[in-house]
């Protein structure tokens, strides 16, 4: 190395980008050469020997080591072109995505608005929401963000128009499915969350239960005569509006319920009036485990 003569072009320090003393590739081509990046010896002909002598570097030139070695692919580090920041790259990719794939807003027509109103009525009944939930500020902002074209109803419209209309529609579908079939009538009383005592009537047709009507009997005494009056009213509705034939009547085993069923069977001998064994089993299990 001491006898090396001056070469025809400069080598460049990959870290400082400063030109190094000129060395002739002919005098060192047969000797081991150290990699400036890893400090490990490289055996074989010098990569500088394949560079044309016309290529030279000066302190004013902005040439990276990849340019000196011949191609960008062979360079592990590129000092010539700074990479954009992550924020800039992300911005360009997002803008490019919007330009290539524009977001299409769904068409909101009268049919969508009608189904939207029907769903609001069903959600209100299914979740037990109060009518004021459609005027809640969070719901209104949700609609502004995701359903800007939807017309949100008021609580009065929800209570007096949407829910009755949806109930009427579902009742029509149920009546069409039950018309001309045999049915079992059942009733049960319970206390609602508002402390009102309700008596609900249902029918079972081909294994499917349909709700008929619920009566608020909070201000009425729990007697067999009052219950029998309601049973007659429901039977009349089923025969005229639903078009079904009731073949059985069942209820729990309370005193007024059993007395009302016995009176109904005497009036209509073709009916069967058994006790509701689901209530019986429920009471037995509760008594066994001491549950209320």
Image (cartoon, rainbow, N blue to C red):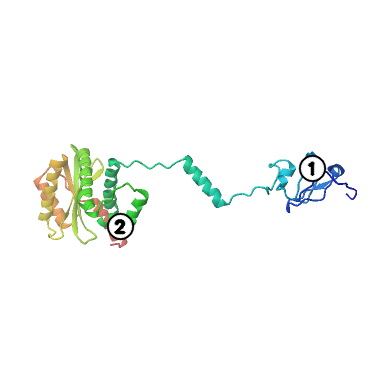
- Element carrying mark 2: loop
Q: In percent of the image, x 24 and y 51: which residue is there?
A: 277
State whether residue 274 appears in this view: no
- From the top left corner, tell me how far across and down residue 83 is, in percent: 61, 49
Look at the picture and state if 198 lies above or below 65: below
- From the top left corner, tell me how far across and down residue 268 is, in percent: 10, 44
- State the residue in front, 276 or 94: 94
- Element carrying mark 1: helix
Q: In percent of the image, x 25 and y 43: which residue is there?
A: 208
- From the top left corner, tell me how far across and down residue 274 is, in percent: 19, 48
**Quarter the C terminus occupies:** bottom left
Q: Which mark is residue 48?
A: 1
Q: Crowding near pointer 1: few (<14 within 10 Å), some, many (20+)? A: some
Q: Seen in the image, is 48 located left or right of residue 234?
A: right
Q: On the image, which quarter does residue 134 sit in?
A: bottom left
Q: In percent of the image, x 9 and y 46: which residue is there?
A: 267
| Pointer 2 residue | 136
């Amino acid at each position: 190395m001491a006898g090396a003569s001056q070469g025809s072009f400069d080598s460049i320090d990959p870290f400082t980008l400063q030109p190094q003393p000129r060395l002739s590739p002919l005098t060192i081509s047969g000797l081991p050469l150290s990699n400036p990046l890893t400090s490990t010896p490289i055996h074989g002909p010098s990569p500088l020997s394949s560079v044309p002598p016309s290529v030279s570097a000066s302190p004013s030139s902005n040439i990276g080591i990849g340019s000196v070695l011949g191609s960008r692919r062979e360079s592990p580090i590129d000092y010539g072109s700074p990479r954009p920041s992550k924020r800039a790259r992300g911005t360009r990719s997002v803008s490019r995505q919007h330009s290539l794939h524009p977001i299409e807003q769904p068409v909101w027509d009268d049919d969508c608005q009608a189904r939207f109103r029907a769903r609001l009525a069903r959600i209100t009944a299914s979740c037990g929401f109060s009518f004021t939930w459609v005027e809640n500020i969070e719901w209104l902002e949700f609609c502004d963000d995701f359903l800007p074209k939807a017309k949100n109803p008021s609580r009065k419209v929800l209570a007096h128009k949407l829910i009755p209309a949806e109930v009427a529609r579902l009742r029509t579908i149920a009546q069409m499915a039950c018309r001309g079939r045999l049915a079992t009538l059942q009733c049960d009383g319970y206390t609602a969350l508002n402390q009102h005592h309700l008596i609900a009537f249902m029918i079972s047709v081909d294994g499917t239960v349909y709700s008929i009507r619920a009566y608020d009997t909070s201000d009425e005494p729990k007697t067999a005569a009052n219950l029998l009056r309601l049973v007659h009213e429901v039977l009349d509705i089923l025969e005229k509006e639903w078009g079904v034939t009731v073949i059985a009547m069942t209820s729990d085993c309370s005193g007024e319920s059993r007395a009302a069923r016995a009176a109904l069977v005497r009036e209509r001998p073709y009916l069967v009036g058994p006790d509701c064994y689901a209530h019986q089993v429920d009471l037995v299990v509760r008594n066994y485990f001491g549950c209320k």
